Image (cartoon, grey):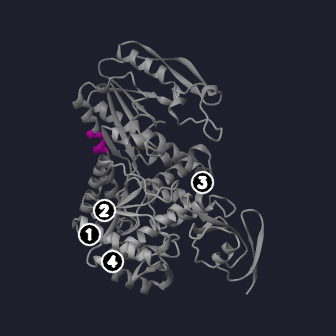
Amino acid sequence: MKQITITLPDGSTQTAQTPVLPAQVLAGMNVPPKRVLGVRVNNDIVPLTEPLSFSCTFEPVMAGSREATAIYRRSLCFVLAAASRTLFPNERLLVGHSLGYSYYYSFASGTKLTAADTARLSERMQELISADMPIETELYSYEETARILEQMQLVQTRRQLNFLGKPVFKLNKLAGFYDLYFDPLVPSTGYLTHFAVVPYEEGLRLCYPATARPNELPPFEDSPKLFSVYAYYKQWGRKLGITSAAELNELIYRREINDFIDITETLQDKQFADIAEAIRRRGNVRVVLMAGPSSSGKTTSSKKLALQLKALGYRPKLIELDSYYVDRHLTPRDENGAYDYECLEALDVAQLNDDLVALFGGKEVQLPSYDFIEGKRTYDGKYIRLDRDDILVMEGIHGLNDKLTPLVPAEYKFKVYLSALTQLNLDDLNRISTRDNRLIRRIVRDSRFRGKSAADTIAMWDSVGKGERLHIFPFQNNADAMLNTALDYELAVLKVYAEPLLRCVTPLHREYAEASRLLRFLQHFSSISAAAVPPHSIIREFIGDSAFKY
């Protein structure tokens, strides 16, 4: 045994003989039981069951934090999978995308989950949780892991072993059910006191608390349009036989990835063509408003849609909403005193509407520019007039909010919501989140074009997410069309750029835990060279060498 020093958040220290469990350290910190879901050790998030064997900084991961919410969600998903294995041993449960504060699940066979089925699953989960059963983590050899995953009928997870290249794997275990360890879980089921299992479409929703209110379930706000996009792409992926990281990796291994890239890009181009045709059919559309969360590919999407509109005889003209920022001294501030450029009040909505009304009335308008260094609006002689075949294209975070364009008649507007909604899963029970997909895009772009480190991008990502929840997501159902900007091969390309950046985030950075998590996530993808990416692809917005000018 050796003696280690543990530094607590207040700067005080404890000494201990190794190995020491986090629970022993927490005992002297006067924290509420079962409010701590994990611990931050040298800025990495580890389970409460992992012994400490070296000197470290030590911080509880408390309920109500984003990290604790992630641990809670993962653990709840694991308990659902264990319950399903007991009740439906001949069915493969598959995780889908998020729906508000819930995840969508279905059976791989296509069998519809009835209300009675979901009630039985909920009851079984409650039995496991009430028993406060331990969630164990054990090491197994490659051969043992393969055998166990086959017994669990985790088909895609088993296939993925072929590409992970490890001799030993961690497995989580609960009530005779096993699955691969990805990231920390709670030490026992009794932590998971708030959940719901609700029938939805052909499957179910597993509901969980929001970070800000960890002791209650938020109301559900349905998004049927977004779900239909997801369902369409899921069906497309099944037809092609590419629904998981393992199946994508097999294509790369067989050197058949180029055809898949062409098919994927062609399908996305068809989306743009379909939206352009929908605009043409409406007949009286004068402005296309495009909105989506950060790194959803808004800039390239506006250019690709403009090309399709040109093919139908339109002459698209772009208005940049950033040009309508109010002067800096008029910009609202957030609760921390920083300028809030994401709120609607940061834009001169009145001037924008005056200009739009004038344009639609056949008048010529001088468009503004915004000097981000001086924080002032300027006019440099850029004039615009709309002729008969001209159509405006505007992209920005408030595009779907009618408060942005209150003076523009509804029949003049066509709204498009963008979302990077990949249909791929990592494996049977682990999804690829839109948030992670966009964050990796943003890390790569910020490094290549804005001189930011991965730590810088990760540090501001929570703030970006807050703005999206306030100003974008509430209005997504206002869209006339939804566009999926994810490309199912893109993470295999982005990893080539992202991994070196993420490895530069050290344990001295607060952002180390998130960087480490993303590195573990990206290891599930084989690499694809950027040379395989077409010049007009949305991916080029993030990695460079696009055929479009930005």
Residue type highlighted by circle 4: Arg
Q: Which quadrant of the view contains residue 91? A: bottom left
The Cα atoms of the two marked residues, 3 and 2, are separated by 36 Å
Residue 454's disc is 3
Callout 4: SS: helix
N-terminal of the two: label 3 or label 1?
A: 1
* Label 4 packing within 10 angstroms: few (<14), some (14-19), many (20+): many
For disc 2, the marked residue is 204
Callout 1: SS: helix
Disc 3 or disc 1, which is closer to the eye? 1
Q: Position of residue 321 (x, y in %)?
A: 48, 29
Q: Which quadrant of the view contains residue 399? A: top left
* Label 2 packing within 10 angstroms: few (<14), some (14-19), many (20+): many
Callout 2: SS: strand
The Cα atoms of the two marked residues, 3 and 1, are separated by 44 Å
Callout 3: SS: helix
Residue 117's disc is 1
The overriding secondary structure of the stretch rendered in magenta is: helix
* Label 3 packing within 10 angstroms: few (<14), some (14-19), many (20+): many
The Cα atoms of the two marked residues, 2 and 4, are separated by 15 Å
Residue type highlighted by circle 2: Leu
Callouts 2 and 4 close, C-beta under 8 Å: no
Residue type highlighted by circle 3: Ala
N-terminal of the two: label 3 or label 4?
A: 4
The Cα atoms of the two marked residues, 3 and 4, are separated by 39 Å
Give whichever of 44, 301 is nearer the camera. 44
